[in-house]
Image (cartoon, rainbow, N blue to C red):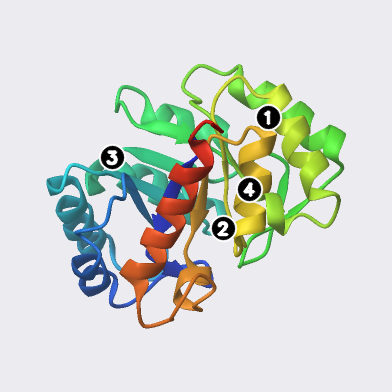
Amino acid sequence: MIEFIFMLTRDDMTIPDAMSVYQSIRSTGLRYVGFKDVGLPYATLRELAAAIRSDGREVMLEVVSERPEDELRSIRAATEIGVDWVLGGTHPDEALPLLAGSGLRYCPFPGTVVGHPSQLRGSIDAIAEDAAALTKRPGVAGLDLLAYRHDGDVEALVGAVVAAASGPVIAAGSVDSIARIDALSRLGAWGFTIGSAIFEGRFGRPDDVAGQITTVLDHVAASAEPVR
């Protein structure tokens, strides 16, 4: 079954009221909750991570800072914030030594990532080759793929990256419909993130975050059930 990661983010930034929103969704069946490295100070992210982990959930920090020095500062901070996964970032050579021995699962971006909100550029072949090379590296657990932020054939991209990678592929960014979730599941993605689309009400009422999360979780679970 494909995994749903709810992101307390909008427009590639952690939302200002992330803690209060998290409190409102604690009763949902979520297994994974994440946030970005931009939008809130690290101290607040540490408190947020502690609250999420206290409920038995796993925490994902997605690194979207554009400047290399900011990215690596966030990678270093991840070991202190109390997360379980580090997603994103484009400088594995420098990031891997910072994460060594931490036990954190590191899933960098394959391909060429530009701008903020992040966009994925490059040919499908080049991104797939990068995916294969990254996941052969010790310390790289999987990939954070900006599938629907690519300017080409998204389904061909996801299929090629899943085939090339030797670890889980998480589709991040612009997963804003049941159709896209179904496509990612069919193509073999391990998981997907949704942040902005929930806050925009793409899966129900914008003011009912918990209800939208439950809608997505129920659909994923139902889709995984064998046809009788």
Q: Which residue is mark 1?
A: 162
Q: Nearer the viewer, residue 57 or 129?
A: 57
Q: Is residue 179 left or right of residue 1?
A: right
Residue type at mark 4: give it.
Asp
Residue type at mark 3: give it.
Thr
- Horizontal and vertical percent position of residue 23: 18, 67
Q: Mark 3 or mark 4, which is nearer the start of the sequence? A: 3
Identify the residue at horizontal 15%, vertical 48% (top origin). 55
SS class of the residue under badge 3?
helix
Nearest to viewer (mark 3 / mark 1): 1
Q: Nearer the viewer, residue 125 or 79?
A: 125
Q: Is residue 30 left or right of residue 144?
A: left
Nearest to viewer (mark 4 / mark 1): 4
Q: Is residue 139 left or right of residue 44?
A: right
SS class of the residue under badge 1?
helix
Alpha carbon distance from label 2 to label 4: 34 Å
Q: Mark 1 or mark 4, which is nearer the start of the sequence? A: 1
Identify the residue at horizontal 21%, vertical 74% (top origin). 20
User: On screen, 85 above or below 24?
Assistant: above
Number of residues whose C-alpha sits closer than 10 Å to that of mark 2, classed few (under 14), some (14–19) or many (20 or more): few
Q: In this orientation, does residue 65 appear?
A: yes
The tag on residue 79 is 3
Q: Which residue is mark 4?
A: 182
Q: Mark 4 or mark 2, which is nearer the start of the sequence? A: 2
Q: How many marks?
A: 4
Alpha carbon distance from label 2 to label 1: 28 Å
Q: Mark 2 or mark 3, which is nearer the start of the sequence? A: 2
Identify the residue at horizontal 24%, vertical 49% (top origin). 81
